[in-house]
Amino acid sequence: MNSKFIGLGTALVTPFKQNGELDEKSLRELVQRQIRGGVNFLVPCGTTGESPTLSRKEHLRVCEITLEEARPKGIPVLAGCGGYNTAEVIELGYELKNLGVDGLLSVTPYYNKPTQEGLFRHYEALSLAVELPIILYSVQGRTGVNIEPGTLKRLSQIPGIIGVKEASGNIAQVARVLHEVPSSFVVLSGNDSETIPLMSLGGKGVISVVANEIPREMSSLVKAALEGDFNLAREYQRFLLPLMEINFIESNPIPVKQALASLGLCEPVWRLPLVAPSAENKSKIEVILKEMKLL
């Protein structure tokens, strides 16, 4: 099993300045805060990092900065590398490999909705071309396509494909996935609130949004679950659930970035087509932060 990507990985937000440019200083501070919080690995340039709005140069720069901060501390970096054009995904994969990332997180091609055979060939091509560990990302609610358990079983037999971020929201599917794939295949939750049920079935952790705001407590939840102490994990879940839920009151990463801005950790700046949350939802986010004594 590839132990680099077991436990808590944070799907990092990408901070921007008021003029819309990449905020490198805030990004470094956010990464350092994650490392202090005890996360096991970092995931820059996923959809939580607003990757669809980043230029190629910015995408690589965010990953480079994350590596610069994480590498001295021995924290692996799993870089976002997805898209709907296989050739372009492979090209990005080459560039990320040259930067020195430890692995790739690759979301299913969106909009063009490939068949299961198309998904298999897409990921097979990526793995054969870019010799890095690859974790697949199945999130049908955002991409329109699901990696079915039978397809994951086939993909798990390709040496470079080591795991999946499972965000279908379907626990029955998660159970079937864990039944189909080898025990060495790393199954991670893609939904914070489903971390405990997935790990109780044999999953190995989570790629988390809520860890942006509260890394230490989410790290403790995942550590307890890995050690089989689900009573303790549930205690952390009770504390964290309101924040997990409010993070999706609008499309991710709108609420989590607003929360971080309220905590003084980044500017409240998104790139179109994402915009600030409504005034009502901003108030709801701040109420939760106050109730959890984060503000």
Image: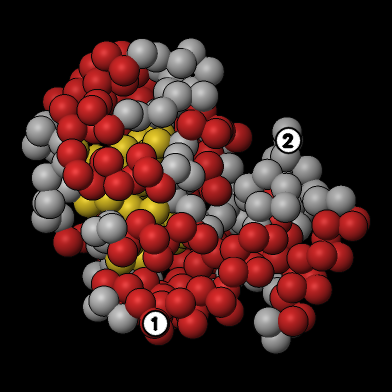
- Horizontally, residue 44 falls left or right of residue 14, namely left
Q: Are marks 2 and 1 in contact (CB under 8 Å)?
A: no
Q: In the rendered image, is residue 127 in sight?
A: no
Name the amino acid type tagged 2.
Leu
Q: Residue furthest right?
A: 279
Asked which quadrant contains residue 98, the reply is: top left
- Horizontally, residue 124 falls left or right of residue 47, namely left
Asked which quadrant contains residue 154, the reply is: top left
Q: Which residue in the protein does label 2 denote?
A: 272
Give above or below for 51 relative to 216: above
| Numbered badge on residue 134 | none
Residue drawn at 35 percent across, 77 percent down:
230
2 or 1: tag closer to the N-terminus: 1
Q: State the image coordinates of residue 194 (x, y, percent, origin top left).
A: 46, 58
Q: State the image coordinates of residue 10 (x, y, percent, origin top left).
A: 44, 61
Name the amino acid type tagged 1.
Asn
Badge 1: how crowded within 10 Å, few (<14), some, or many (20+)?
Answer: few
Residue drawn at 30 percent across, 47 percent down:
175
Q: In the rendered image, is residue 243 in sight?
A: yes
| Numbered badge on residue 231 | 1
- Horizontally, residue 83 falls left or right of residue 124, namely right
Q: Secondary structure at mark 2?
A: loop
Asked which quadrant contains residue 24, the reply is: bottom right
- Horizontally, residue 29 falls left or right of residue 207, namely right
Cα distance between the residues tagged 2 and 1: 42 Å
Residue drawn at 31 percent across, 64 percent down:
200
Give above or below for 272 relative to 183: above
Residue drawn at 40 percent across, 84 percent down:
232
Q: Secondary structure at mark 1?
A: helix
Q: State the image coordinates of residue 199 (x, y, percent, origin top left).
A: 32, 62
Badge 2: how crowded within 10 Å, few (<14), some, or many (20+)?
Answer: few
